[in-house]
Image (spheres, grey):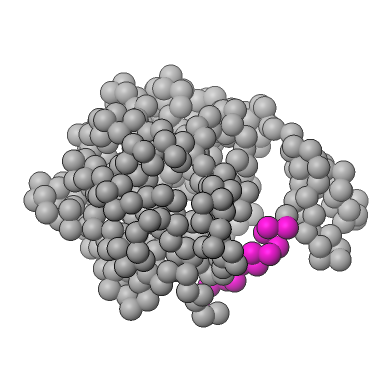
Amino acid sequence: MGEHVLRIWQEGSRDFSTVPGLVWRSAEGECRTNPGPAPLIEDLDALPFPAYDLIDLPSYWRLWSMSIMPPPRRYVSMFTSRGCPYRCIYCHEIFGKRFRAQSPERIVDELEHYVRTYGIKEVEFFDDIFNLHGRRVIEFSELVQRRNLRVSISFPNALRADILTPEVADALVAAGTRESALALETGSPRIQELIQKRLNIPKFLEGVAMLTDRRVFTWGFLMFGFPTETEADMQMTVDVVRKSKLHVVYPWVVTPYPKTKLFDVATRLKPEKMAGLNYAGHDYVVYPCVNLSEVSDKMLKSYLFKSFPVLFANPLRALRIVRDFPRPWSVWRYWEGVLITLTSKKAVQLGQAPSETDGPVINTEQILKC
Ligand code: SF4
């Protein structure tokens, strides 16, 4: 599809109406969606390496990425698969539900290219689900070791904890994994069912332990504010955090994006809250756009921050945080960011529109039309 779009562009036309599934803006400024599904890329190994030579990498290295590690970091990002077979209702479906993946050889060729060409020391994987096939992870790890690629690996997004096995955890660590996000989202089995994430919570706890016992720094993603969520459900999330070996957590407020099943569920269950929902400049902590849960805004805010004291209450966890942070001398910069967020006067302004200086304004009308 990309080639088709570029060919049209090179030929000087701005009419992309023949590209199936493409969302584009016409010369008149109108947002259009072409009919038909965009064709899926089947052979991901055939894709060329991203043209990192066209961008100013050192400028990127000075910015915060999704990793927990503060800049500057000599790193690149990689995306080695498309699609995820799980059906979480808040998630995108950009790549379809069928999992397609690059071979371990293709991944390691690309990684080696970045090491030799740019001297990178770190890599971040952003797949939807890097570890769906354990064999692929193990073969990737063996190749990284055989080629002696000494890079620090981060997964700010890509691992599902309840399908981890000890063999895969060993392989990840042997390849150089130092840090990983692991999504719990909710500790309530009822809400897990509602959102169709269907995370196996006992296995999630085992998966977290597999990585932390191997000294991988883990941070948990939490979501508060799902439709029908009660205080008891929220407390279950905090209880799972307490039981877990997660080093730290990132709690967010649920946002129902257009074109997701969550958006439809929320519109059915909470039509009054969804009417005129304003996404302008929103984020998930300081300016969440809506509270869809059964609890008051005040209580939702309190649960956003309840898991932090739970973390601090365990002295062993505090020791592990200092011991396992990939660059121990920079751990203070992570806590500095958390404290600034927590103590910010602006922290958690539910449903309030930020000022123009707070960020780009998203045109919700346009999103809904596309
Ligand atoms: S497991 Fe992750 S990527 Fe897959 S559907 Fe759920 S949220 Fe999306």
Q: Locate residue 281 relative to residue 340 in the image: left or right.
A: right
Residue 52: image location, x then y, percent: 59, 50
Please tell me whether residue 359 belongs to the stretch shown in magenta: yes
Q: Quadrant of the N terminus?
A: top right
Q: Nearer the viewer, residue 120 or 100?
A: 100
Q: Residue at x 44, y 51 (%)?
A: 227
Q: Residue at x 30, y 33 (%)?
A: 201
Q: Quadrant of residue 170?
A: top left
The extreme left residue here reads 315
| Magenta residue span | 357-369
Q: Residue at x 58, y 48 (%)?
A: 264
Q: Nearer the viewer, residue 73 or 299?
A: 299
Q: Is residue 102 above or below residue 280?
A: above
Q: Nearer the viewer, residue 224 or 323?
A: 224
Please tell me whether residue 51 belongs to the stretch shown in magenta: no
Q: Locate residue 233 relative to residue 155 in the image: left or right.
A: left
Q: Quadrant of the C terminus?
A: bottom right
Q: How many labels, in total?
A: 0
Q: Residue at x 53, y 40 (%)?
A: 79
Q: Is residue 68 visible?
A: no
Residue 318: image location, x then y, percent: 14, 52
Q: Is residue 51 visible?
A: yes
Q: Quadrant of residue 246?
A: top left
Residue 233: image location, x then y, percent: 30, 47
Could you tell me what secondary structure mostly forms the magenta stretch?
Answer: helix
Q: Is residue 247 above or below residue 160?
A: below
Residue 328: image location, x then y, percent: 21, 54
